[in-house]
Amino acid sequence: MLLLLPLLWAGSKAQDGRFWLQVQESVTVQEGLCIHVPCTVFHPPVNYSNRYPAHGYWFQEGTYPHQDAPVATNNPNVKVQDETKGRFHLLGNPQIYDCSLDIRDARRRDSGTYFFRVERGPFMRYNYRKNRLFVHVTALTQTPDIHIQGTLESGQPKNITCAAPWACERGTPPTFSWIGVALTSLGPKTPHSSVLTLTPRPQDHSTYLTCRVSFPGAGVSTEKTVQLNVSCECQAREAGYLRAVGVGGWGDRGSGILGTGSCKLDLGGRKDYTQLHTLPVSKVLGEKGQCSPSCH
């Protein structure tokens, strides 16, 4: 057993064939998102090691393994830093030479350099300081996608979907909020999307609708705004009779207009429009519906 100590001490002084680690030098992730960092670690087998599990630890540069908490570990008896608890995970099993690190709900203050440490049994202790990992957390620039199914028509309910397909499934689920027009109701929701059921009004035309996606695990949000294009079929407010407004003579194929008050019907050049003024509104436009001069 005493012969093992010089071996391990030599291994801790120089990263040779007995102790080595392979990991990316630098990775980049946006705030609120996740990143998986593959990592391979090797430590020499020793006679007693089969009786002891291998414990791995990721430490932030500038901390001391003997007195500071790691950011992630597979040792259930060791407490990790409060700042990284539940967000940094040692997914790999160092016993089978896997030191892969998973970072969720990334925060700007996570930026920095990290190194790996392995422990096995009462004597094996090694810090892999020569192969360190630099994590760069940047501002969140991803924006959600807003999809409107078909054309927005006044008085007709329509589903509008806001999706963030790039959000991390392993992280804290994002929250969705809608800002803008008078909202009707919220439809089905998935971890990465929200459906708004909107019944647009004529006055909603050219207004703005915003979908905001917030990431509570990182305290950041992103949003997207679209301008609504509401169209409506000009229909009479109530049953009655149309009167001709500015119509031409028989056979004139110009654009005639029929209307009652503010409700007007563009005849689109029908040559028989001069006869429509004697027809009930219900026969021309239907019994129901609304008309507004702001229809488009």
Image (cartoon, grey):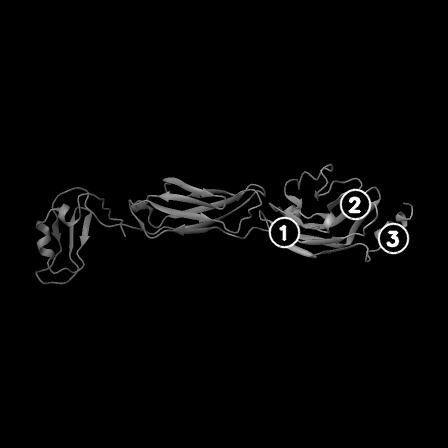
Image point (10%, 51%), residue name = 277
| 173 lies left or right of 8 | left
Relative horizontal placement of residue 186, taking residue 125 as reference (left or right): left
* Dot placed on the residue nearer the N-terminal end, 1 or 3: 3
Q: Earlier in the sequence, mark 1 or mark 2?
A: 1
Disc 1 to disc 3, C-alpha distance: 32 Å
Left/right of residue 241 with respect to residue 97 in the rendered view? left
Q: Callout 3: helix, strand or loop?
A: helix
- Please state the horizontal and vertical placement of residue 51, each as a whole percent of the image: 79, 42
Amino acid on which the number 2 mark rests in the picture = Asn
Q: Secondary structure at mark 2?
A: helix
User: Which image quarter is the N terminus in?
Assistant: top right
Secondary structure state at the residue bearing disc 1: strand
The residue tagged 2 is 50
Q: How many marks?
A: 3
Pointer 3: what residue? 10
Residue 139 placement (x, y as % from top left): 58, 51
Question: Looking at the rendered structure, which numbered label has been put on residue 36?
Answer: 1
Q: Earlier in the sequence, mark 3 or mark 2?
A: 3
Q: Are marks 1 and 2 in contact (CB under 8 Å)?
A: no
Q: CA distance from mark 1 to mark 2?
A: 29 Å
Q: Dot 3: within a 10 Å radius of its alpha carbon, few (fewer than 14), some, or many (20 or more) residues?
A: few
Q: Label 3 sits on what residue type?
A: Ala
Q: Position of residue 248 (x, y in %)?
A: 11, 59
Asked if residue 191 is positioned above or below residue 24 in the image, the reply reads above
Frontmost of labels 3 and 2 is: 2
Mark 2 neighbour density, 10 Å: few (under 14) some (14–19) many (20 or more): few
| Left or right for 150, reference 255 | right
**Label 1 amino acid?**
His
- Can the viewer see residue 119? yes
185 and 55: which is toward the camera: 55
Bin the neighbour count of mark 1 within 10 Å (Cα to Cα): few under 14, some 14-19, many 20 and up. Answer: some
